[in-house]
Image: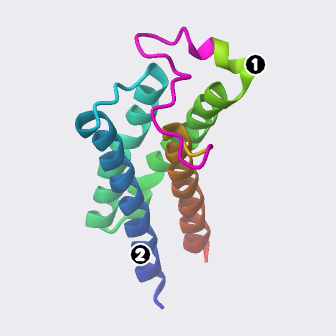
Amino acid sequence: MHNSKVNENILLGIWTITFVATAGSLFYSEVMGYIPCELCWYQRILMYPLVIIYGVAIWKKNMNLALPGLILSGIGMFVSTYHYFVQKLPALEETGGACGLVPCNLEYVNYFGFITIPFQAGIAFIIIFVLHLVLLKQNRR
């Protein structure tokens, strides 16, 4: 397969993940009525621009335009991980109670006892970050 086609497919995969993550967060807030906490807002601030960044990179067929996505997804991984720890680790749980109007340790969803909203966001950020690294490695060839 031609290198540029592989790059386009990886970019499309990343864009799809960013779109689904953005739509999912809007579903939770606008349809389900879950009010985002402060850390959720930070994750949204890091995720929402990725839809545009990777969309433009696909449209222009220029993966260099997507470089800010690597930075935003890297920061997002850490914010999501910290938020998840605030929800799940007793040592940090108290700090999440004073997070703002909505406590950051509040778990609107908890599928299978461990899949919360920050967990979902964290997985999306990790996949985006790793795929972008694969994209960079692919481009070096």
Question: Which segment did they paint magenta?
Answer: 95-113
Image vertical order of residue 107 relative to residue 104, above or below: below
Farthest front residue in view: 112
Residue toward you, 83 or 50: 83
Magenta span: predominant SS is loop
- Amino acid type, label 1: Ala
> Residue at left 62%, top 68%?
137
Q: Secondary structure at mark 1?
A: helix
Give x and y (percent) for residue 70.
Answer: 52, 49
Assign the C terminus to one quadrant of the image. bottom right
Task: Look at the picture and state if 2 lies above or below 16.
Answer: below
Tag 2's secondary structure?
Answer: helix
Residue 95 in the image: state x and y as whole percent. Answer: 63, 12
Please report the residue visible at 39 percent of the width from the left and 32 percent of the height from the top. 45
Q: Quadrant of residue 82?
A: top right
Give the residue type that dot 2 points to. Answer: Asn
Residue, x 24% and y 39% (percent of image)? 31
The numbered dot on residue 91 is 1
**Can you give x and y, in whole percent of width and height, for residue 32 in the image?**
29, 37
Residue 68 percent coordinates (x, y) = 45, 45
Q: Residue furthest bottom?
A: 1
Query: Around disc 2, counting alpha carbons within 10 Å, would you say few (fewer than 14), some (14 to 19), or many (20 or more)?
Result: some
Residue pointed to by mark 2: 9
Residue 110 covered by magenta stretch: yes
| Relative to 91, residue 137 above or below | below
Q: Which label number is shown at residue 65?
A: none
Graded by Cα atoms within 10 Å as few (under 14), some (14 to 19) or many (20 or more), the crowding at tag 1 reads few
**Residue at x 59%, y 49% (from the top left corner):** 112
Residue 51 shown in magenta:
no
